[in-house]
Amino acid sequence: MSALYLCHGKPHGEPRPSYGDVMTSGAPRSARGTERRAEILRAALEVIAERGYRGASLAAVAERVALTPQGLLHHFPTKEALLVAVLAERDQWDAVPGTGWRLELLGQLVEYNAMRPGIVQTFSALLGESVTEGHPAREFFTQRYEAVRANMAQVLRTEYGERLPSGLTPERAAPLLVAVMDGLQYQWLLAPDSVDMPAAFRDFLTLLGED
Amino acid sequence: MSALYLCHGKPHGEPRPSYGDVMTSGAPRSARGTERRAEILRAALEVIAERGYRGASLAAVAERVALTPQGLLHHFPTKEALLVAVLAERDQWDAVPGTGWRLELLGQLVEYNAMRPGIVQTFSALLGESVTEGHPAREFFTQRYEAVRANMAQVLRTEYGERLPSGLTPERAAPLLVAVMDGLQYQWLLAPDSVDMPAAFRDFLTLLGED
DNA sequence: CGCGTCACCTGTTGATCGGTAGGTTTCGTT
DNA sequence: AACGAAACCTACCGATCAACAGGTGACGCG
């Protein structure tokens, strides 16, 4: 999924079988190593936002943490492993809005995202790339969207019950909800001054709220 | 804009000041040359769909039309010129649904797109890339979205008049309409069997039609 | 028939890519 | 103090990248 579903570092309920289970390296890390790893991941997030995954070179990421590309490869054996680690980290942070979520929180989430263009840009760029052949993030996004749609349907159900405007079921409205969040991001990233992303999203929510 | 707004070769009303005005080359083309150019553009479209713009090498495009990379550069002086030409070609085809459009046509357009995953994938991949720094397609998409939002607002106005559900104005609903089209494309590309793009889009239209 | 232009080639260049091999330094532990 | 592992380096590799230079053959047009 895109940055939208990334939450404010909110703890997630239960341990999930996640993309992060693919360990990046057998190398045990210690003390400062773990710290360095985190720095690298943050740098990678930035570079991917600026150039995409394919356009992000190991050298560019390494430079940002004052390392040689080879020093970087000590922490992450391959470029793909680095991407996987970036995705896995977010996998822990976010919550793929769980069963307990309410729509109001989604609105706040969009507002939060509007203050963090970097993260939004990273995941929007990755989402776009992921539809190409053999992209390492494709499986990640596919699985994630499946989960997000299901959870969104659940959120809609607990919020509005079984019946929505136009006789829509929560399951049929969920893809629309997700699509609006993602689509608005692209418009907002391209023209932040022309598109009020949070306001537009709330417009959509009220549209769903009518009965 | 994304593939959604590409129409069935429908002629557009008036000549527009378009992205295509950036001529790709001063080289005059003749007879077979023009034909070859078209083949190259088609091949480029395919390769971009598969690998994105950054991932698409001149060699890959050239190979698909039985050419050397240098032979390709004879027709398009740089890689960026090739991309511009691809975008410009679509700029002619599509219609950025003009004032005369009706919502019903939009539904058919989505159905049409659902039968052409290649084109949808090309423009979805490009849209994703375009949010990164210095991407050659960024200006194209920015301008296009501005125009599409304006036209969509007009379409909504002629269809539903001034007042939509929840007191939305056409101008406020337009970004949502565009967002739904784009967002649904990504979900559909990632999981064609799980997401019925045309049906979902029609769901959204009926949502707007309620009063 | 001849000449010019277009189409396309070979050859090459310099940059950059991700990644390997193997060494050296730093540091925590005992 | 000694040892081992982790952190990080230099050196290097083959592949691939977009693009330049310069040449050749074919074809259209006068």
Image (cartoon, coloured by chain):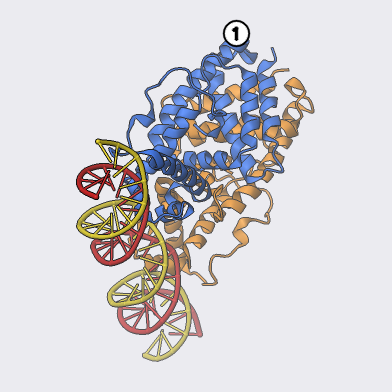
Chain colours: A blue, B orange, C yellow, D red
Q: Is residue A54 visible?
A: yes
Relative image position of residue B14 (x, y in whole percent): 69, 52
Residue at (50, 60) in percent of width and height: B80
Along the horizontal axis of the image, is B90 left or right of A55? right
Out of A42 and B167, give the one closest to the viewer.
Answer: A42
The furthest residue to the top: A162
Q: Identify whether C14 is placed above or below C3.
A: above
Along the horizontal axis of the image, is B183 left or right of B173? left
Relative image position of residue B192 (x, y in whole percent): 42, 29
Callout 1: chain: A
Residue at (63, 48) in percent of width and height: B142
Identify the residue position indicated by label 1 in the image: A161
Residue at (71, 42) in percent of width and height: A194
- Quadrant for the C terminus of chain B in the image: top right
Q: Amino acid at mark 1?
A: Gly
Q: Is residue B7 visible?
A: no
Q: Identify whether B85 is placed above or below A180.
A: below
Relative image position of residue B140 (x, y in whole percent): 60, 52
